[in-house]
Image: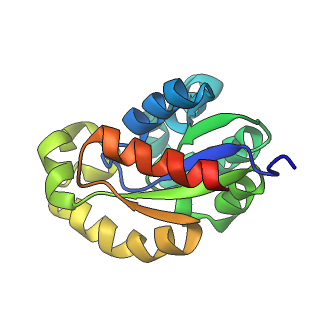
Amino acid sequence: MPKDKKNIVLIGMMGCGKTTIARLLKEKLHMHWVDMDLYIEQKYQMSISDMFDISEDYFRERETQCCKEIAQKENYVISTGGGVIKNFENIEALSQRGYIFYIDRPISLILKDVDTSTRPLLKDGAQKLYDLYEQRHSLYLKACDYHVKNDGTLEEICLKIMNLFKEL
């Protein structure tokens, strides 16, 4: 009997590896891939940074609309923005056809890889990332079907996700 859910949805903090992992999973599983942030920027012909300059609410409304559209697709690996869990409507939509994997990476490792000056929510510095993690960690846990630690190699985390997905 075919699975009713055919998508892999990656959630987690900015810089946790969602986009990189999604690209690898796309290749390994022969699926399509969509990056939510790129999708939003293309659809609205505006950068996320510019949307945030209008207001975070302005961006979040567009994010929710795009979640509903993307959720209708099948055979996709979907990498979401870090704040997608702020609106439960997003998770409801994405979980209709997708299994949600929380990519949990230690903040210290994220800070080694992320240029905080290019992230709208981090313009005030690295401490903001720790604060966001405190605010969002429980929301990620509540939203996910699977909690996956990203503290090893990319190959290891992809293997974990692929094995979980194949068992479903």
Q: Position of residue 102 (x, y in %)?
A: 46, 59
Residue 129 to residue 20: above or below: below
Q: Position of residue 47 (x, y in %)?
A: 46, 29
Residue placed farthest to the right in the image?
A: 1
Could one spot residue 55 in this view of the protein?
no
Quadrant of residue 19 within the rendered picture: top left
Which quadrant is home to the C terminus? Answer: bottom right
Q: Position of residue 1 (x, y in %)?
A: 87, 50
Of residues 120 and 12, the one nearer the viewer is 12
Q: Does residue 164 appear to the left or right of 47 in the view shown?
A: right
The structure residue drawn at horizontal position 21% and vertical position 41%, both measured from the top left corner, is 114
Q: Position of residue 31 (x, y in %)?
A: 63, 28
Of residues 161 and 114, the one nearer the viewer is 161
Q: Does residue 86 appear to the left or right of 88 in the view shown?
A: left
The structure residue drawn at horizontal position 59% and vertical position 65%, both measured from the top left corner, is 145
Q: Does residue 146 appear to the left or right of 106 in the view shown?
A: right
Of residues 85 and 156, the one nearer the viewer is 156
The structure residue drawn at horizontal position 25% and vertical position 51%, both measured from the top left corner, is 122
